[in-house]
Amino acid sequence: MGIYEEICKLKREGKRAALTTIVNVSGSIPSVVAAKMLVREDGSILGTVGGGRMESEVREGAMESMKDEKPKTMTFNMDQTPDDETGLVCGGSLEVFIEPLVPAPVLYIFGGGHVGLNLYKVAMLAGFEVVLADDRELYANRERFPDAREVHTGDLDATLSELTPSGDSYIAIVTRGHRHDIRVLRWALNTPAHYIGMIGSGRKVLSLYQKLEAEGVARESFNRVFAPIGLEISAGTPEEIAISIMAELIAVRRHCTIALPHLRNRIRKEQTDPSSLKQ
């Protein structure tokens, strides 16, 4: 199978990869301009950009590019030190462009009310695919969410049993009440989802944590949860709340060094110090 056929296959399967291409050369190198190598998310490769130590470093760069979801260029000067594997000094230099091939992130929104609807709108603008779930057909339908990848209605437990978020998925719990929130959170903690966020005041969040802990859920598992959901921007309207949630999702996706440590520390503090909770 060729590289482009494999790219299409990985895209259909929702898997990550990175395409590496030699884009500039000078002097003698162990390959040619436009030579390509595809690196899969498990580290396996298809094709070659020349082999040896240089190719190993390109593979490592491709893995980083997949993780960061950002393209990068690597430059190699091969006229000074011999390759550890071949012992050859090629006498040239080259540049390799690395393009991450990352499927659109999937956001699972539980709750089709005002916040859920506006979150769906901004998520679509931000390049997320949306799976919407609500037990009320009035709030979960194609007229309301025309561009969602999936719309689920009916019994919530039945819906949860059908959904299989991946490690690249995001979960936003914005249902209409505590009873539904705790059911979804209990399920979400057993998924590999990259992000789990839940709406509600700090005291409500702590109350749900305590109930789940009484059921046997490990306290440490709550460190995965962003709750109360959204960046703290004093949001009041459903539209503003949706924007604050999406800002948090983007911060998580882009590994924002400013926002994330603050959020993680806030979560841990709220779990151990009830006085720190927002009203």
Image: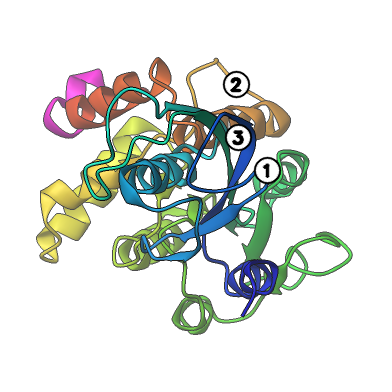
| Mark 1 closeness class: few <14, some 14–19, many ≥20 residues within 10 Å | many
User: Where the C terminus falls, by quadrant?
Assistant: top left
Q: Percent x, y for residue 162? A: 51, 83
SS under mark 2: loop
Task: Tell me the residue at 60%/54% (across/down).
Answer: 36
Amino acid type at circle 1 is Leu
**In 3D space, how far apart are the residues under numbered discs 3 and 2 (Cα atoms)?**
12 Å
Amino acid type at circle 2 is Ala
Task: Tell me the residue at 80%/60% (across/down).
Answer: 145
Give the numbered dot on residue 235.
2
Residue under pointer 3: 246
Depth order, front residue of 115/72: 72
Residue under pointer 1: 119
User: Where the N terminus falls, by quadrant?
Assistant: bottom right
Residue 232 within the magenta-colored segment of the rendering:
no
SS under mark 1: helix
**In 3D space, how far apart are the residues under numbered discs 2 and 1 (Cα atoms)?**
13 Å
Residue numbers of the magenta segment: 271-277
